[in-house]
Amino acid sequence: MSACRADPAEQVSVELPTTDPPEGAPRLVLLLVVDQFGAHDFDRLEPLFTAGIRTLLDRGVSFSQAYHDHALTETAPGHATLATGSFPRHHGIVSNRWIEEGHLVSQYAIDDDLYDESPLELEVTALGDWIKAIYPESRVFSASGKDRAAILMGGLGADGAFWYDEEIGGFKTSEFYTEPDWLDSFNEQNLLDERFGQSWEPLPLAPEIIEELQLQRLEFGPLVEELPLSFGPPRAAADEKFYSAVRDSPWWDEYLAQFARYLIEAEGVGADRTPDLLALSFSAADFVGHDHGPNSREYVDLLLRLDRTLGEFLDFIDERVGLENTIIGFSADHGVVPVPEVRHRLGLDGQRIGSETILCLQQVGPQLAEKHGMDRWMVPGPRLAPGLVERTGRTRADLEEETAELLEQCPAVATVWTGSELLLEVDESDHDRWLYANCYYPERSPDFLIQFEEYSMPSVGLVTTHGSPYDYDTHVPLVILAPGLAPETLDIPVRTVDLAPSLANLAGIPIPDEVDGWALIDPATPSP
């Protein structure tokens, strides 16, 4: 079996298997996602990984040039893309939050009036749904520190999706799913309480490694203390304040792995020949990255500890299911913007967007309304005000172009993409337009998508963030491990929409015609 781009015309013509899996079919498909883990950080820490990530690299195929092909690199669209093999313009999850056309208030990507949270905003099926379409007896579960990650990874028909409940320090689900009897039993163990009264001590790093990694001590931001760190207020017992604070620590990822092991045992995941899917997203790197930055000792230490956590978890999978019976996909939902102040120390460019840009952008709508004698030019989204086309007698494209020209004059703004131009045909050669078009969904996207200059960081109370079309946000690790697959590193351009089709193809699951990705690995080709 070898890694290559399978012909998309061939991959959809796979003969449908029966509900009785063929000999040698996987018992488990495991999707592992790290929230906020760019390829740059993956590569610079690679020599230090000794456990789980090392297993993936030593036994799997690593694609060193894997990119998200959408511009709004956030948690919800990233996880939806990895699970569905489709771009946001097709799966519909364009952002963590959006304002529906005709509305003035934003909605969350998993909001549901009936169930509170559900995957019903997804417009396409996901990997778990493809598996269930062939093997209805398959079990599909997902879990994460974040609700949106868990729900969107599971697809439309998951048997269960679970996420962290900071009020009780346990896991919960929504009424969209059937709550299992074992969930209370797990939560009653209060495993996180074992960390109460403990500090986060850094793993030892040689001075030359600290220098090579260019670790920087920040003197600003929400968390200016450095390791070792304590969590929660000065109280004598664990409570919701402590349970909330530990999200900024490696203990949160450890806890997810503990939960996943309990789920596997309780549900019998991977216990028989019918392939099951388990999708896990480890969220702590996103919290630590936002609060400390990717050049912090905290961020590096967390990822080194996550490597150990993954190592223990993969050992558990090997013992219970067998890695020879497991297909694994590993990636990230997005990267992170390098901290501008750290770049300055290193003699590099970078800027934190401030009041001058904010005020300039805010004044464009009122200026145009006054110029043209209108009560209002823009509404939240931002979108053109309803009825503006009719009142002015101009085309929507013309109004959007005039507005975009003013927005582009603001400091730190590189380009403003309009809805009208993003609906036009575009190909990958027009790189930035392609990325923005891939996350444009007219009913949910604004009329104006603002692209800031590279290495610009909006000042939103965080040390750093993500959400741009630049490599530091779009370039992520992508590793696939499967029985019979020869380990190698491939330096060829691939996309994150290729992950779900690749896992499906390896598992013998037909890939829906409508997906944007295609299989990277042809299981019919022998390994060298």
Image (cartoon, helix red, strand yellow):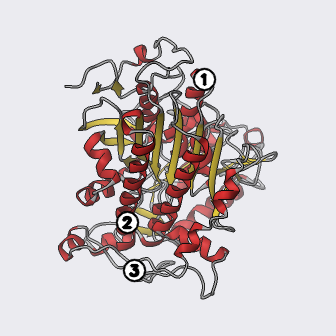
Q: Amino acid at mark 3?
A: Leu
Separation of marks 1 and 2 at Cα, in angstroms: 41 Å
Identify residue for label 1.
Answer: 133
For label 1, count other residues whose C-alpha is less than 10 Å away and answer few (under 14), some (14-19) or many (20+).
some
Height in image: 231 above or below 266? below
Percent x, y of residue 108? 68, 52
- Between 434 and 397, the one lying in front of the other is 434
Image quadrant assignment for residue 350: bottom left
Residue at 46% in and 40% down: 30
Q: In this orientation, which residue lies closer to the viewer: 463 or 270?
A: 270
- The front one of 401 and 284 is 284
User: Image check: 8 left or right of 391?
Assistant: left
N-terminal of the two: label 2 or label 3? 3
Decide if residue 414 is on the left or right side of residue 109. Answer: left
Q: Secondary structure beneath disc 3?
A: loop
Number of numbered discs: 3
How far from the left and from the top, in percent, is residue 156? 65, 35
Q: Residue at x 49, y 40 (%)?
A: 82
In the rendered view, would you say 215 is above or below 335? below
| Residue 294, label in figure | 2
In contact (CB < 8 Å): disc 2 and disc 3: no
Q: Which residue is mark 3?
A: 227
**Could you tell which of marks 1 and 2 lies nearer the N-terminus?**
1
Q: Kindly report the distance in space between the C-alpha atoms of the residues bearing marks 3 and 1.
A: 48 Å
Q: Is residue 94 something one can see in this rendering?
A: no
Precedes in sequence: disc 3 or disc 1: 1
Classify 524 as above or below 282. Answer: above
